[in-house]
């Protein structure tokens, strides 16, 4: 009995209730005409697509910089890597590796500049990060029209310049990770390669936080005054965490794009930080502590609910309200997560 109470206290009632609700949706699905195999596949695909973006929250949370609402800055670095890869006609595994090779250095560079701002506004990081993310997206809306890309699959046909709003990855590196060693059994599909990559990124971040630098970063997030008294350069640790978080965001969006099949520019990245923030908070993280377990649990719960609720309710009421339901569920979960964040902060 004590063990059960300890589990409930550690895992939290909100996650238990959401988990039970998700299980009920899976149980209800076949009785309302929804294929369970397809539903599970869709959920797993969305977890793999979004997992690295949620993981990008961990370094900044652990260093005390708060939740990374400036994630669009890292996403922009990933978009630049992806569009450059398409511009040079890179295909298959080489194409996505080339995109990573461009995106990661850009993510680190953007993260360094981003960190200089956050180190000057200690205590207000999340508010400033939101403005940084939004303003960077607005700035890039002009840049996408002016950058010297010339690939006919990317530029506007009638003007001969400026990138299109949506660019297909088909014929380049579409599903390169997802289809690697993938499993297809009837309506069930498991993107093995994408999950292997997700596990690799989880392992890299887990191992990093067991190094001397990672331990120092955690100490800064837990108690910056004690860390400073111990001889740790607080601003340097915060800078490294922001750079790492931004680089992970750049990697995450490329993983997302290869599965989704499209590169979305202009206003596409604007709100992508909010689902990632909601997912890690639903997983049990707080504003100054996050773990790999929080990432995995939160991503599965958030994407599971987001995937299952519209399809099950659609079949129950026999009306196509999937997009409306998806918006309500998504924003409702984000609202819950953000209000929970405020309570933890107090």
Image (tube, rainbow, N blue to C red):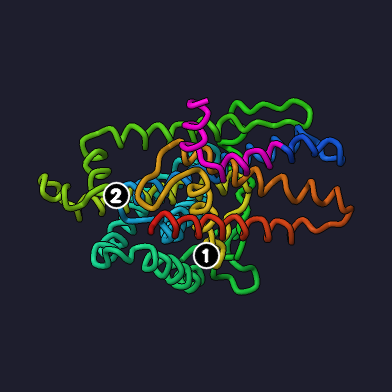
Pinpoint residue 92: horizontal percent, then vertical percent. 55, 38
Q: Which residue is nearer to you in this view: 3 or 21?
A: 3
Which residue position is annotated with label 2?
63
Residue 56, numbered circle: none
Check disc 2: other Cα within 10 Å, few if <14, some if 14-19, many if 20+.
many
**Which of the numbered marks, if any, corresponds to residue 270?**
1
Q: Earlier in the sequence, mark 2 or mark 1?
A: 2
Against 42, residue 84 (above or below) is below
- Asked whether, in this view, residue 174 is left or right of residue 97, the answer is right
Q: Residue 246: percent from the left, percent from the top?
A: 38, 53
In percent of width and height, residue 229 lies at: 10, 49
Residue 344 higher or lower than 291, as above or below: below
The boundaries of the magenta stretch are 1-23
Instruction: For residue 176, say whether it is visible.
Output: yes
User: Which of pointers 2 and 1 indicates the residue nearer the eye?
Assistant: 2
- The quadrant of the rendering that contains the C terminus is bottom left
Residue found 70% across the figure and 56% down from its top: 326
Kindly state the secondary structure of the residue where label 2 is placed: loop
Query: Does the rendering let one see residue 150?
Result: no
């Amino acid at each position: 009995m004590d063990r059960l109470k300890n589990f409930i206290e550690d895992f939290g009632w909100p996650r238990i209730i959401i988990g039970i609700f998700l299980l009920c949706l899976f149980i209800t699905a076949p009785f309302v005409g929804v294929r369970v195999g397809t539903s599970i596949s869709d959920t797993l695909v969305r977890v793999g697509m979004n997992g690295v973006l949620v993981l990008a929250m961990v370094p900044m949370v652990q260093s005390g910089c708060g939740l990374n609402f400036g994630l669009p800055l890292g996403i922009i670095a990933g978009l630049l890597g992806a569009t450059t890869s398409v511009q040079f006609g890179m295909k298959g595994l080489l194409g996505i590796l080339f995109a990573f090779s461009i995106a990661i250095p850009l993510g680190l560079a953007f993260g360094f500049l981003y960190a200089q701002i956050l180190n000057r506004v200690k205590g207000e990081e999340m508010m400033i990060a939101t403005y940084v993310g939004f303003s960077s997206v607005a700035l890039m809306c002009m840049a996408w029209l002016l950058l010297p890309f010339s690939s006919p699959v990317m530029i506007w046909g009638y003007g001969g310049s400026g990138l299109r709003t949506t660019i297909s990855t088909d014929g380049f590196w579409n599903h390169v990770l997802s289809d690697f060693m993938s499993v297809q059994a009837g309506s069930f599909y498991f993107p093995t390669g994408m999950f292997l990559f997700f596990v690799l990124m989880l392992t890299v971040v887990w191992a990093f936080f067991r190094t001397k630098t990672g331990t120092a970063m955690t100490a800064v997030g837990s108690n910056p005054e004690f860390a400073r008294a111990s001889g740790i350069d607080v601003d340097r640790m915060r800078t490294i965490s922001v750079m790492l978080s931004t680089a992970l965001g750049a990697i995450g969006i490329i993983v997302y794009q290869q599965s989704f099949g499209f590169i979305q520019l202009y206003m596409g990245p604007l709100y992508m930080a909010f689902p990632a923030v909601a997912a890690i908070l639903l997983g049990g993280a707080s504003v100054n502590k996050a773990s790999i377990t929080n990432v995995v649990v939160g991503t599965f719960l958030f994407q599971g609910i987001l995937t299952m609720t519209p399809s099950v309710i659609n079949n129950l009421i026999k009306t196509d309200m999937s997009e409306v339901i998806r918006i309500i569920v998504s924003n409702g979960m984000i609202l819950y997560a953000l209000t929970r964040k405020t309570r933890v902060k107090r």
